[in-house]
Image (cartoon, helix red, strand yellow):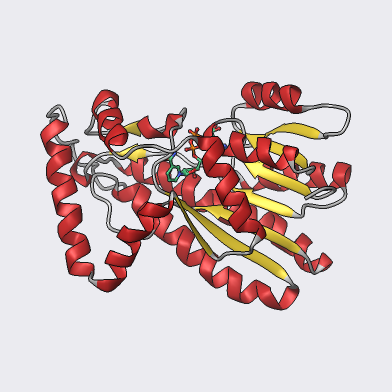
């Protein structure tokens, strides 16, 4: 990846920060684009050395004009974007009866609209160069039924669908598209992340549930994922053992839903009971 330019949204923390680190180690010039500018700048400073160009730019992926501006800055200074990692995301955990309309809007705005904004801002520049690789971060929650996180799961299913279609359409321009589907990786998102939250499960209970699934180290995740990206794999599931659930989903959706039902029961057992949210009155 020496000489390549990568743009990583949500690059200041967790998986994004590990992807940035591994990209720099492989000789890429990297743009860390994150809503958290301070941590993005700290990471850029830590990684910068005479042989490595690492930049930090403030970006809220929910805003298309901001995305366009950040991309224009990167292209002006670095000439092009070879790799776009649409990685920024938040978690809003909880059952649907505890969700408000704001919860739905927030998760759709970051996890789905944010990815769409990245594609709209960068794909045309790749088309004109007839080259590039777009890597969207979805989740195992985008491949199988996941309970107590419907908003998250719905947005991640959408990102998988979008990525598969884009991969086929972009082929004629020589542009590659991959989608990362992490299982559980040890990052702040396990309790929602800096901008996420939980509506019916406490942070402690969520951590307990996450730990039971043996979270992977983010550096390990990034290393394995990048190798798969370089092999141009379409749907990248890491850690690999999560593939068993994906196979089960395709083999028997009914059995997969039965497994999800067991997981829901387990979540309800550990969670601290809370009253359901008051329904939002219709506007107008
Ligand atoms: N950690 C896991 O177990 C796991 C599993 C499946 C999928 N994922 C996905 O991996 C991606 C990275 O998450 P992570 O686990 O590293 O979590 P994280 O919370 O450590 O990192 C998320 C990053 O996204 C940034 N971000 C959030 N909202 C933003 C916005 N509006 N604009 C710009 N940046 C924003 C945050 O500041 C943070 O730096 C997410 O898309 C997440 O859904 C993570």
Return the residue nearer the eye: 22 or 116.
22
Is 119 left or right of 160, judged from the image as shown?
A: right
Q: From this view, report whether residue 15 is shown above or below residue 50.
A: below
| Residue 10 visible to an observer of this rendering | no
Q: Residue furthest bottom?
A: 172
Q: From this view, report whether residue 176 is shown above or below residue 14.
A: below
Is 129 left or right of 183, judged from the image as shown?
A: right
| Residue 185 visible to an observer of this rendering | yes
Residue 47, image x and y in percent?
Answer: 74, 27
* Residue pictured at 30% horizontal, 38% vertical: 93
State which quadrant residue 32 falls in. top right
* Residue pictured at 88% horizontal, 28% vertical: 50
* Residue pictured at 78% horizontal, 60% vertical: 125
State which quadrant residue 95 falls in. top left
Return the residue nearer the eye: 231 or 5.
231
Residue 44, image x and y in percent?
Answer: 73, 27
Residue 176, image x and y in percent?
Answer: 67, 66
Is 66 left or right of 165, judged from the image as shown?
A: right
Return the residue nearer the eye: 53 or 226.
226
Return the residue nearer the eye: 197 or 174.
174
Is 240 left or right of 223, judged from the image as shown?
A: left
Residue 283, image x and y in percent?
Answer: 31, 46
Looking at the rendered structure, the number of numbered marks drawn on it comes to: 0
Q: From this view, report whether residue 59 is shown above or below residue 104.
A: above
């Amino acid at each position: 990846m020496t000489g390549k330019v990568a743009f990583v949204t949500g690059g200041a923390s967790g998986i994004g920060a590990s992807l940035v680190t591994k990209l720099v180690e492989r000789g890429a010039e990297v743009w860390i684009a994150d809503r958290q500018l301070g941590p993005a700048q700290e990471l850029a400073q830590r990684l910068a050395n005479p042989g490595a160009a690492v930049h930090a730019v403030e970006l809220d992926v929910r805003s298309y004009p901001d995305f366009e501006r950040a991309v224009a800055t990167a292209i002006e200074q670095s000439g092009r974007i070879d790799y776009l990692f649409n990685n920024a995301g938040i978690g809003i955990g909880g059952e649907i009866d505890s969700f408000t309309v704001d919860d739905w809007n927030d998760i759709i705005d970051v996890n789905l609209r944010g990815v769409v904004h990245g594609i709209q801002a960068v794909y045309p520049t790749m088309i004109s160069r007839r080259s590039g690789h777009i890597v969207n971060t979805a989740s195992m929650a985008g491949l199988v039924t996941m309970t107590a996180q419907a908003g998250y799961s719905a947005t991640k299913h959408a990102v998988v669908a979008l990525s598969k279609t884009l991969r086929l359409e972009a082929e004629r321009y020589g542009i590659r598209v991959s989608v990362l589907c992490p299982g559980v990786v040890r990052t702040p998102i396990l309790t929602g992340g800096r901008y996420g939250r939980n509506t019916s499960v406490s942070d402690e209970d969520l951590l307990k549930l996450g730990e039971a699934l043996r979270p992977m180290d983010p550096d390990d995740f990034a290393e394995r994922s990048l190798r798969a990206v370089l092999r141009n794999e379409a749907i990248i599931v890491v850690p690999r053992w999560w593939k068993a659930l994906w196979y089960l989903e395709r083999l028997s959706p009914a059995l997969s839903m039965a497994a999800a039902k067991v997981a829901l029961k387990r979540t309800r057992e550990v969670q601290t009971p809370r009253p359901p949210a008051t329904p939002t009155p219709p506007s107008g």
